[in-house]
Image (cartoon, rainbow, N blue to C red):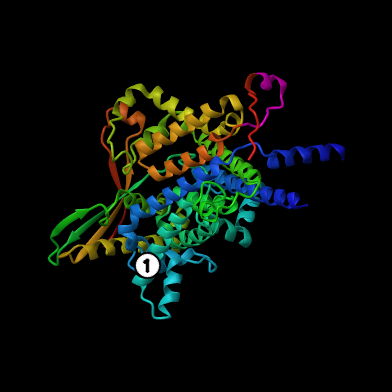
Amino acid sequence: MKRKWQLFGIFLLLFMVFTIGLKGTFDGYYGFYYDKEEYKKPFIYELSNKIVELEPVSMFTAYTGFDTGYGFFAPNVASDFVLLFELQDANGNVLEERIMPEFKSKESIVRYTSVFNMFMDKVVSSKKKSESQYFKYLDVVLKQIAKSVLNESHGATKCTAKLYLYDYPTLDRYIKGEKTDNLILISQIK
Amino acid sequence: MEKATILYKKIENFFFENKGNAEFLGFFRISIGTMVLLHFLSVIRDFDKFFSSKSIVPQDIMSVFHPGWLLTFSKITHFFESFGIAENTVILGAKIMFIGLCINIIIGFYSRMSAFLLLLLQVALLKGSSFFIYGVDFFTSMSLFYLILLPSDAYFSVLRFIFKKKAKEVNFMPVKRMFQIHISMAYFFSGFDKLLGYNWRNGESIWKAIHLPYANRDFNFDFSWMADHSYILIIIGWSTVIIEMLYPVFVWIPKTQKTWMMLTISMHLGIALVLNLYYFSAIMIIWNLTNFYFERESVPVKFPLFKRWFYKKYNPIGI
């Protein structure tokens, strides 16, 4: 009897892993191919969403790390961002330009750059979504990062944060002679 | 009914039949404990910038979308502050506790309890500052969860040395099988999701990944020559998809098990060198070695054709 319960527990956990993996696949696929279109979610997608959102399931997965999907860099390698800070004195003179707060280790930089994932919504979200509260929330986050950089800089009284989408030429464009990267301004916070 | 009974017996045998050796327990415990400790120490000097009230993005902004039941580090500090204990003291206590629990896990001193407490602390820290988490943090949590389930300090541990107790016969196979299936599913989804993206099939994703602004900063490899030999990018893209998607097939076949594991580890070494995601690569390599390096006897393949090609019989190892 004990073995049956153990097997039940194992299958339940593996079912969760499978369901979250499946949800990740649907999220990635529809997020990539249908990001600007309305679409009807397949039944399995809806079901996996419902299962994952059940409170006992989300509690368990949050406390065990099982809430992660597995589609790393899939179905497409997401674009990255460059956040540039322009520090100015009281007279408006530019004192310094920085790309991130001061960190003491490389791993801290990896952690810091994880914050850029959320700004992808500024690029791919539909017009309707871009007018939503969430868009304003992202601006607040940007403003707070800028404030943090300003607090580190002695002498500066103002910090302008410019969020750029990092655009490296695609293989085709590179072969045709476009060898340098471009920064596309997405947002600016003063 | 009889068929169902036979099927159940087969499943039960698969999960409970003791076919491995216990060395993986010590390896998993020590390597995960060490990796989590090093990972924590690597950001400890910037701890305040991510996890305290002085973090780059204030905790209350990060917690907007947190469910009420989530125990975050800011809630813990507020709790202690209500008793007059300053945030700095709580942070110092958390740092000491984190390091101490990692050491307990490494040396094998009540590792399961230590893993449980460390998991709570790690989740409180990381989920509380969810803007700054990435893949490795989830895999760290899952590793700690497996350390709780596995009798990880029953072998090669200080606890066993102190109490001079003979290791209790504990069947770790059900959890090991679950762990093996888990990693197999993870790789399958990772490969399948990539296959769905046309950029993985034409090499563009590899080109993009190696030119991300925060990748390839440690060694600064020059990949521009690849543009003239784009077939290499296509080969790397397809290889990644094939290695990952077919992982659940070839890692379970005795003759291809070690080869497939080495291919997967090579892929993670490549990720470490080029994308500079050292800790993520390290934890994936640990997962691979834990699950499939210590297999002395692999699961027999029942198809006669495959059996002739792939199945090597080993002598079972008792514990």
Q: Residue at x 44, y 66 (%)?
A: B73
Give residue A67's position: percent from left, percent from top.
Answer: 54, 53
| Horizontal side, residue A151 vs residue B14: left or right | left
Residue A29 position in % (x across, y down): 53, 42
Compare residues A122 and B126 and report the one nearer the observer.
B126
Side (left or right) of A43 relative to B293? right
Q: Which residue appears at 40% of the width and 37% of the height?
A: B271
Q: Chain of mark 1?
A: B
Residue assigned mark 1? B91
Using the rendered image of the protein, determine whether residue A34 is visible from the camera's viewpoint: no
Quarter of image, res B234: top left
**Range of the magenta residues?**
B297-308
Other-residue count near label 1 (Cα within 10 Å), few / some / many at <14 / 14–19 / ≥20: some
Q: Is residue B298 magenta?
A: yes
User: Is B267 located above or below residue A47 in the figure?
Assistant: above
Q: Work out whether B253 lies above or below B10.
A: above
